[in-house]
Amino acid sequence: MKKLPLAIIVVVLGLFFQACHESKEEQIQKYIANFIQQYPQATLQDIYKGSFQDVFGPAHMLTNRESVKRYILHELEEAEVLEGAYYEPCGWKGNFYRINLKAIKDQRITADELTDAFMESANGIDTTLTSTFIHEWTAIQQVVRVVAPHLQNYQEDSTWLAELLQQGKYVVHHSQAFDSCYQPHYRIIRRDLFEEKILPRLK
């Protein structure tokens, strides 16, 4: 068997790595486009929130199990609206999923099951803000400019988020517009736990 010339190998490898890069951008574009389609009133702040949730999960939210369960039950009682899908990925990688409390209301899962998965999802997560995350968000925001340049308050949010990261902080809430329009009620679950313990109950 003849060996391929080195030049051809270099070109093939270059195309391979280019395809991988394009694949990542395409995945980000698809996620953002779907997110905006589902939540047309969302802002850059809401896209950012999903991005940090997809990296840091629920670790920044934990207290203790009983408090977590108690607040879930309280939120269920107080919620005026529980609509939408039972679950959705937090970000384009799908490392973590948002589980709608509607799943408990509809008796697809129990509060205990969601609480246990939520608590376990925080195990082993390093909550330190890193340059890797900042670079990741920069790449995502570049895609947002192309896919959704019409987002309300885009420049204000962009400036505010940049200042937040410069201060070594990363946690934000949903925007007021998002809260008002969609009234989100969910908990974040790590993908492997979601697929093993939650998803089978939601099919």
Image (tube, rainbow, N blue to C red):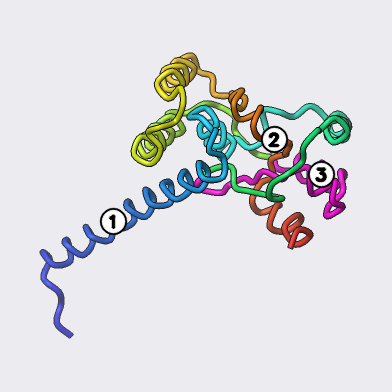
Residue 150 sits in which quadrant? Answer: top left
What residue appears at the point 37 percent right and 39 percent down from the top-left corner?
143
Q: Is residue 176 magenta?
A: no
Which disc number belongs to residue 17?
1
In the image, which residues are magenta?
92-121
93 shown above or below 177: below
Is there a contact, CB below 8 Å, between mark 1 and mark 3? no
Q: Amino acid at mark 2?
A: Pro
The residue indicated by pointer 2 is 184
Image check: 82 left or right of 11? right
169 shown above or below 32: above
Q: Earlier in the sequence, mark 1 or mark 3?
A: 1
Q: Secondary structure at mark 2?
A: loop
Residue 159 sits in which quadrant? Answer: top left
Residue 38 sits in which quadrant? Answer: top right
The residue indicated by pointer 3 is 116
Is there a contact, CB below 8 Å, between mark 2 and mark 3? no
**For this rendering, which residue is in front, 176 or 168?**
176
